[in-house]
């Protein structure tokens, strides 16, 4: 079973036990609250430790490239659909000038909305 799923199930059980203690045994409500608080902190730390990780990035890899291509082969802009209106002529995120039909800003890499 996936560790994150197991942590989520355990978390639900701890929450259920804490609420049961709070409502059935009010004299132990403070202990139940501290149990719940301790589990939340522990759960966040464990979920962070078991987070999915991507493949390692090599030291020579460039980090300034965008996963969104802004132009096709030989720098030609990508074709836009016939129903979209002309673009604004600048990036709404960084104000860099862009040509019509560009899908992502060549300066900042943000995907541009297509109206």
Image: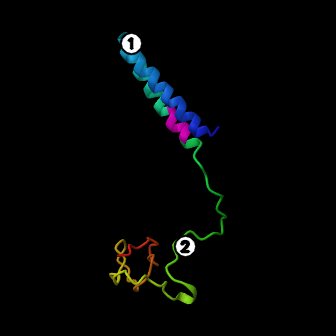
Query: Is residue 32 positioned above or below 10 on the image?
Result: above
| Residue hosting label 2 | 65
Rounded to the nearest angstrom, the CA distance separating label 2 from label 1 is 58 Å
Q: Quadrant of residue 49?
A: top right
Count of numbered circles on the image: 2
Q: In the rendered view of the protein, which quadrant contains the N terminus?
A: top right
- Give the main secondary structure of the magenta stretch: helix
Q: Which residue is drawn at 51% across and 34% down?
A: 43
Which residue is depicted at the point 44% across and 71% down? 111
**Judging from the image, what secondary structure is the residue with disc 2 in?**
loop
Q: What stretch is highlighted in magenta?
A: 42-47
Is 27 displayed left or right of 67 in the figure?
A: left
**Residue sticking out furthest to the front:** 83
Q: Earlier in the sequence, mark 2 or mark 1?
A: 1
Please provide percent x and percent y for residue 22.
Answer: 38, 17
Label 1, on which residue?
Answer: 24
User: Based on the displayed image, in which of its 4 quarters is residue 112 positioned?
Assistant: bottom left
Dot 1 crowding, Cα within 10 Å, few <14, some 14–19, many 20+: few
Q: Residues within 10 Å of mark 2 (few under 14, many from 20)?
A: few
């Amino acid at each position: 079973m996936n560790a994150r799923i197991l942590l989520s199930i355990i978390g639900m059980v701890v929450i259920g036990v804490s609420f049961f203690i709070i409502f059935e045994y009010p004299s132990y409500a403070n202990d139940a609250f501290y149990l719940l608080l301790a589990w939340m902190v522990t759960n966040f730390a464990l979920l962070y430790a078991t987070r999915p990780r991507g493949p390692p990035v090599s030291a020579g890899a460039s980090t300034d490239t965008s996963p969104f291509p802004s132009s096709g082969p030989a720098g030609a802009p990508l074709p836009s659909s016939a129903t979209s209106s002309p673009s604004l002529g600048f990036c709404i995120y960084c104000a860099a000038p862009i040509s019509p039909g560009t899908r992502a800003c060549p300066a900042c890499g943000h995907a541009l909305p297509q109206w």
